[in-house]
Amino acid sequence: MTERTIYLDPDRHGPSSRKINVWAHRWYALVELDRDGHVDALTRRGDSPDLPAAYTEAVTRAQHTSVDHIRCDGYRGTLSCCIGPSLVGLPVPFARVGAAVEALRSAELDHDYSGLHALADQLTLPIEDWLAPGERELVRGVDFSAPPSIFLHFLRGRAKRHGVRLNGRATAGSVWVRPTLPAFEKLKRELFPEQHPGWIDRWTGFIEQDGTTARPWVGGGDRNLSYGAVPVQFRRVETPSGGKCSCGISLQRDSDSDKGHTSHHAAWAFGVRAPRNLDWWADLAVVTTESPIAWRKLTHQVGRMPQKENHYDFNSWSDLAEPRKTPDKVRAYLLKANEHIIGYLAARDTSQHIRWDLTDRSGYGDEDDTLRPLIDLIWVADSYRRQGIGAKLVQALADDFGCQVTDVSWSSPVSDAGRRLARRVSPDGIWVG
């Protein structure tokens, strides 16, 4: 369909005119009532621009039912459902665009909200019927219009909100469902009724009526291996619910960080996956502040691993703007193995050093102004630690600069892991920057 504008006031181009815009998207149409100029005119007169409560209630109900309808058809992206004095947005299926335009026009000009309620009634899905107890077949073209697998995915999400186990299966032209109530969900709702107002247990004790069409058997194990089983018993036990994982992420689970922790922990343990668009001619790559942005972005990504693990305030690599030269030759060494970056060393050159014999509680020795490579940070993926990877990185830095490993300088303070590595590569002491 084409995008169009419907003007609601006689003076179409007046500063206080109201209009309805229809925007076509791939899965749905967005019908927007633009009241911006009208709100300015009301404000200048001293009148309140707020929408009446009945208006807001009707639009909100239409939005909720329409969003459910669009999700049921298979759309999984974001939806704009704004509602305010200046703009009212109503996403609807394409077939309901005319009804949505007329409902908003009547609500705005005639204060008649019946059209919005009628639209909501037309778009309301029979979710309560779909999740009612008992075995049933929902037929495509009769009960729903989306592909069965998409509809089943939507229905599983709605069943989860109700605390119901769906026991569903998609076929070529239908979806079979047998909603049941797990014992744990029943107990939770009985213990906390204030969190589930209006909830009624329709599933416990339900008996299938005679003559009900049975779900076709498609092979595999028996369907009723849990029929008549005794529910699992639960006990309250104090368990650790906080603290930090070794990778640096909190163990406290929330809705946003669970997947993030999983992916970060995998990268921390096995290394950051090497992008396929970068050609690695050897195992060790030296990235400078003049390198292409793809390499510098990768270095910044690897730098997040030690930043999270050790709770540093800043990433050890921050050069993400235009290529530039640095007087101290800032650079990073990325070691790749098994298609993952498993080792990382950030370094620069400096001429201010102090000698340290690596003895606990001992003071620093003589100062030195020789230009040396300085290790800012070393990180190795957890699965590759204690295998000499850190020593290889230090040796690569020394070879690249043209000095001995014992001449390399280390950033102060030196961590416990860094001190152990320093003792292996330079047992008689190190230079500290």
Image: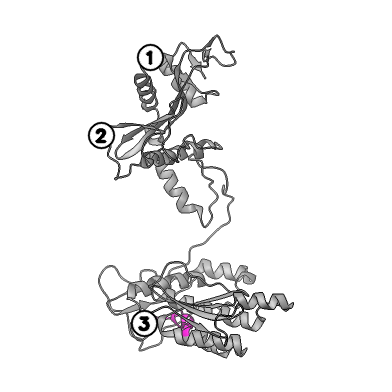
Q: CA distance from mark 3 to mark 1?
A: 75 Å
Q: Is residue 233 above or below residue 307?
A: below
Q: CA distance from mark 2 to mark 1?
A: 25 Å
Farthest residue to the top: give it: 366
> Which residue is more in the foreground, 156 or 329?
329
Does the magenta-highlighted stretch encompass residue 124?
yes
Say whether disc 2 or disc 1 marks the residue closer to the N-terminus. Answer: 2
Q: As drawn, is 416 to the left or to the right of 198?
A: left
Q: CA distance from mark 2 to mark 3?
A: 57 Å
> Which residue: 45% across, 29% down?
326
Q: Is residue 319 above or below residue 372?
A: below
Residue 202 in view in this figure: no
> Which residue is more in the foreground, 245 or 67?
67
Q: Amino acid at mark 3?
A: Leu
Label 1 Cα neighbours within 10 Å, binned few <14 / some 14-19 / many ≥20:
few
Question: Where, by quadrant of the figure, is residue 213 drawn?
Answer: bottom left
For residue 281, the mark is 2
Q: Can you give x and y, in whole percent of width and height, for residue 247 in the image?
A: 48, 40
Q: Amino acid at mark 1?
A: Gln
Q: Amino acid at mark 2?
A: Trp
Which residue is under mark 1?
404
For residue 138, the mark is 3
